[in-house]
């Protein structure tokens, strides 16, 4: 029983050391670097998001122009057909 108890104590101690190493206090320099890194990542995400928005907006405008052009073409063809029919009479 004593052997198992010592093994458990050793395992528990290793877990405590690992945990404390993972959550050690950061120095001011490390903290500042983390903040700067996050700011850089945020700026990049913002740029990416703006680029996607611009691309979607441009695609939407292009699609609207295409639809408008098609409508105008159909109207022009209809008007032309109507004129020809009137001229035949």
Image (cartoon, rainbow, N blue to C red):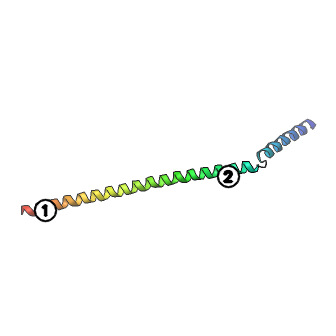
Residue 16, labelled with which disc? none
Relative side of 41 to 48, left or right: right
> Nearest the camera: 53 or 18?
53
Q: Quadrant of the C terminus?
A: bottom left
Q: Are marks 1 and 2 in contact (CB under 8 Å)?
A: no
User: Which x, y percent locates residue 79?
Assistant: 18, 62
Residue beneath the point at 82% across and 43% down: 17
In the displayed structure, would residue 53 be above or below residue 3? below
User: Which x, y percent locates residue 80?
Assistant: 16, 59
Label 2 packing within 10 angstroms: few (<14), some (14-19), many (20+): few
Q: Quadrant of the N terminus?
A: top right
> Nearest the camera: 21 or 15?
21
Residue beneath the point at 7% across and 61% down: 88
Total label count? 2
Badge 1 marks a residue whose secondary structure is: helix
Relative side of 81 to 88, left or right: right
Of tags 1 and 2, the one toward the viewer is 2
Relative side of 55 to 89, left or right: right
Q: Which residue is mark 2?
A: 35
The furthest residue to the top: 3
Q: Give the quadrant of residue 64.
A: bottom left
Residue beneath the point at 28% across and 56% down: 70
Badge 2 marks a residue whose secondary structure is: helix
Tell me the distance, in whole angstroms, between the alpha carbons under discs 1 and 2. Answer: 71 Å
Q: Which residue is mark 1?
A: 83
The furthest residue to the front: 29
Q: Give the quadrant of residue 86.
A: bottom left
Relative side of 84 to 23, left or right: left
User: Which x, y percent locates residue 31?
Assistant: 72, 51
Residue beneath the point at 87% across and 37% down: 7
């Amino acid at each position: 029983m004593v052997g198992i108890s010592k093994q458990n104590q050793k395992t528990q101690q290793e877990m405590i050391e690992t945990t404390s190493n993972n959550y050690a206090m950061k120095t001011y320099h490390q903290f500042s670097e983390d903040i700067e890194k996050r700011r850089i990542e945020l700026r990049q995400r913002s740029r990416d998001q703006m680029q996607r928005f611009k691309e979607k907006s441009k695609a939407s405008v292009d699609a609207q122009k295409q639809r408008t052009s098609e409508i105008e073409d159909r109207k022009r063809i209809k008007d032309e057909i109507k004129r020809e029919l009137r001229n035949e009479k």
